[in-house]
Image (spheres, grey):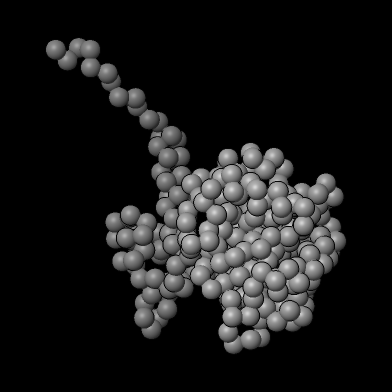
């Protein structure tokens, strides 16, 4: 009765070691990803819950990351945070990308307009903020470096879509579900395509509280020599100071900053 039962494939030591090593890397990445949008510090129980790893496995991985200075533990509360090694690697990555030269331009834009500014690049279905300059005003809205924002609900995301390699329809069709964050979030693909067509005409995008209630913004693309967006400059602030009319006026400054960044980083 058991003659035809399939025999499980035998894994050699090299295959087993490869799978074990890849799994360890994946688990370490999942631990670091916990800090992408969450709080600055997490306890080991929280890390275990967020990564779906058992407590001992999570603790083993965290210890290894701390030994490599990718994470560190606060001696007072015993919670964990990202470590200095990531700061060094992040700075090296920024220098290698060439966008490090953009920070003085963002700071000047923030000083001139009185609002917070940021530089974002596309990674998958999100805009990742790689640089930011804060407004000096007490009431302001800042994007933190490393923050991820849905493309369809962001001024920076919309200009990256509008000036992408693909056609507008193809760019939008490739996106996952257009999640609704506020009453003004664009959740219709046809409406998003129409918005992108207008953005191509005027050269900038306005965010009408589409990601956060009470926050308006305007963004312009950082274009390469073929007219494709490699990054985007964004300006954002509270609705008590900003509206569509004022953002249309500020768009001139944002577009100028984006053009200067394109020259300063020598985008091909």
Q: Is residue 15 left or right of residue 101?
A: left
Looking at the image, how many numbered discs can be counted on the residues? 0
Would you identify the image quadrant in which residue 3 lies?
Answer: top left
User: Considering depth in this image, is 225 or 212 the residue closer to the camera?
Assistant: 212
Q: Residue at x 53, y 58 (%)?
A: 185
Q: Is residue 103 visible?
A: no
User: Considering depth in this image, is 41 or 211 the residue closer to the camera?
Assistant: 211
Looking at this view, name the residue that lies furthest to the left. 1
Would you identify the image quadrant in which residue 153 lies?
Answer: bottom right
Q: Is residue 74 left or right of residue 167?
A: left
Q: Is residue 31 visible?
A: yes
User: Considering depth in this image, is 149 or 198 the residue closer to the camera?
Assistant: 198
Q: Position of residue 113 (x, y in %)?
A: 73, 79
Q: Is residue 142 left or right of residue 231?
A: left
Q: Position of residue 40 (x, y in %)?
A: 46, 73
Q: Residue at x 72, y 43 (%)?
A: 165
| Vertical comparison of 89 with 142: above or below | above
Q: Residue at x 59, y 80 (%)?
A: 240
Q: Residue at x 73, y 60 (%)?
A: 204
Q: Position of residue 117 (x, y in %)?
A: 68, 72
Would you identify the image quadrant in which residue 133 lies?
Answer: bottom right
User: Considering depth in this image, is 187 or 137 the residue closer to the camera?
Assistant: 187
Q: Position of residue 234 (x, y in %)?
A: 68, 66
Quarter of the image with the N terminus is top left
């Amino acid at each position: 009765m058991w003659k035809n039962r399939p025999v499980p494939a035998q894994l050699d030591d090299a295959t087993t070691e490869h799978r074990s090593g890849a799994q360890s890397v994946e688990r370490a990445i999942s631990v670091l990803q916990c800090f992408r949008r969450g709080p600055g510090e997490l306890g080991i129980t929280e890390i275990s819950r967020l990564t779906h790893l058992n407590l001992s496995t999570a603790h083993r991985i965290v210890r290894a990351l701390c030994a490599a200075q990718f994470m560190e533990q606060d001696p007072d509360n015993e919670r964990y945070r990202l470590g200095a090694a990531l700061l060094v690697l992040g700075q090296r990555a920024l220098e290698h990308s060439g966008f490090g030269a953009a920070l003085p331009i963002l700071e000047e834009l923030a000083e001139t307009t009185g609002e917070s500014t940021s530089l974002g690049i596309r990674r998958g279905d999100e805009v990742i903020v790689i640089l930011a300059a804060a407004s000096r005003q007490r009431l302001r809205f800042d994007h933190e470096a490393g923050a991820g924002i849905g493309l369809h609900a962001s001024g920076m995301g919309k200009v990256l879509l509008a000036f992408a390699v693909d056609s507008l329809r193809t760019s939008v069709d490739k996106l996952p579900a257009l999640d609704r964050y506020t009453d003004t979030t664009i959740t219709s693909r046809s409406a998003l395509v129409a918005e992108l067509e207008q953005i191509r005409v005027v050269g900038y995008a306005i965010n009408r509280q589409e990601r956060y209630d009470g926050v308006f913004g305007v963004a312009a693309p950082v274009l390469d020599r073929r007219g494709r967006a490699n990054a985007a400059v964004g300006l954002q602030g509270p609705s008590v100071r900003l509206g569509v009319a004022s953002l249309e006026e500020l768009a001139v400054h944002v577009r100028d900053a984006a053009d200067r960044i394109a020259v300063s980083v020598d985008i091909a």
